[in-house]
Image (cartoon, rainbow, N blue to C red):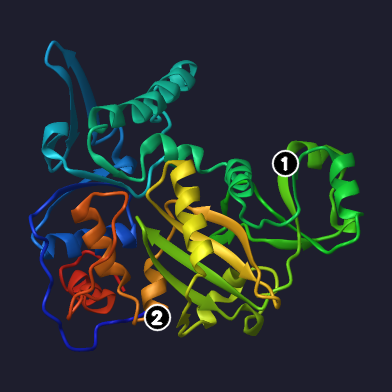
Amino acid sequence: MPDNREGPRRPLTRPISPATILIHTVDGDFHAAVAGHALRERGNQVMEWRGDRVPAGNSCTLKFSAGGLEGALHTADGCISSSDVDVVWYRRRRILSAPPYIDPLDAEFATEELRMSERSHPEAFSREFWVNPHASSLLCESKARQLRYAQEIGIDIPRTLISNDPGDIRQFLAEGSACIYKPLGGFVWDEEGVVRKTYTAAVTSSDLPSDRILRATPGVFQQKIEKSYEVRAQFFGHSCFAVRIESSTLEGGDIDWRLDQRSIKRCEPAELPMEVQASCIALMARLGIVSGGFDFIVTPDDDWCFMEVNEAGQFFFIESWCPDLPVLDAFCQFLECGRKDFTYAPVANPLTLKDITVSAYEHGLISK
């Protein structure tokens, strides 16, 4: 994380009326810490549900009665009642497992019960505005669903194969054009203290492992699209904040710009064509989400090719690379507004990521 402790402070903008915002998060989440601090500074009440504290410290209750459904999330900081919340930001969740003190014979049962409970308690907050809705968030993880909806809407996508059939994979790679591979979902390994992550990679038939391994690890295989540049476009409702990523200048950028993202110091704003922006909003509606980070490749012919949308991805890096884009201020407005058709209202002195990061550090909410 860059050291942003220098620079003048700006006055904070205030919401028209304070909101009570519940953030689903886990330990070490920079986005949740910074946004939560910003929202509190703007006069909102912010509460956290920490998935990594279940079941040791956190518990949940759903009570059905003649008066309807009431929910309560019990945390070390107190009880969060479903009647007290206006907006839920479903930022991060933890896949739960039975704690070690459960008898090994019962661990699988306890794990399933904990996971079902985690899926159930959002029902108590179903009347509130969610970023993003719980069920839609889970469904949006399917790359196949994203690509199907995008194609039906008329958005350009690469020629794609999702498969674990060795014959189909080898035939797809043999059809002439250069191809890439990426996983159906991301993963992180810790190998003796070294963190390794999944990235996009070039792939040919000679790179493939044995058929037995292919069958055991389904993946996404796509035609490699020629790049002029790439765009990350973050939507909050109907407002879009996008940067142009000159991936050709980055090491490995012809495959995956994230491999060398630390080299990026600044990006220019990107403007989406009207039809592309409208298609993104339409795709979010089909997916049932109200916010998402869209990745596009723009070809030398100026065609916009959709790669994927991350409904809960990182987005503050957009403002850190392009301070002209008021991403943090817009996100706070979005949560305070609580509408899927939100449009950002620019202010003279927007709250900035740089200033609020300094303040969050001084309050001990984040580390360097």
Q: Position of residue 48 (x, y in %)?
A: 22, 46
Q: Position of residue 21 (x, y in %)?
A: 18, 48
Front tag of 1 and 2: 2
Position of 202 with respect to 13 (left or right) is right
Q: Position of residue 211 (x, y in %)?
A: 87, 40
Front one among 30 and 154: 154
Q: In the image as oriented, which residue stretches furthest toward the top?
A: 66
Q: Position of residue 263 (x, y in %)?
A: 53, 82
Residue plotted at (66% across, 80% down): 251
Residue plotted at (61% across, 58% down): 307
Q: In the image as oriented, which residue stretches furthest toward the front?
A: 275
Residue plotted at (54% across, 75% down): 261
* Residue ID for mark 2: 322
Residue plotted at (17% across, 43% down): 86
Q: In what quadrant of the picture does the N terminus appear?
A: bottom left
**Is residue 1 visible in the rendered structure shown here?**
no
Q: What crowding class fits label 1: few (fewer than 14 Cα within 10 Å), some (14-19), or many (20 or more)?
A: some
Q: What crowding class fits label 2: few (fewer than 14 Cα within 10 Å), some (14-19), or many (20 or more)?
A: many
Is residue 133 placed above or below 11 in the rendered structure? above
* Residue ID for mark 1: 218
Position of 177 with respect to 327 (left or right) is right
- Quadrant in which residue 292 is drawn: bottom left
Contact (CB < 8 A) between labels 1 and 2? no
**Amino acid type of disc 2?**
Cys
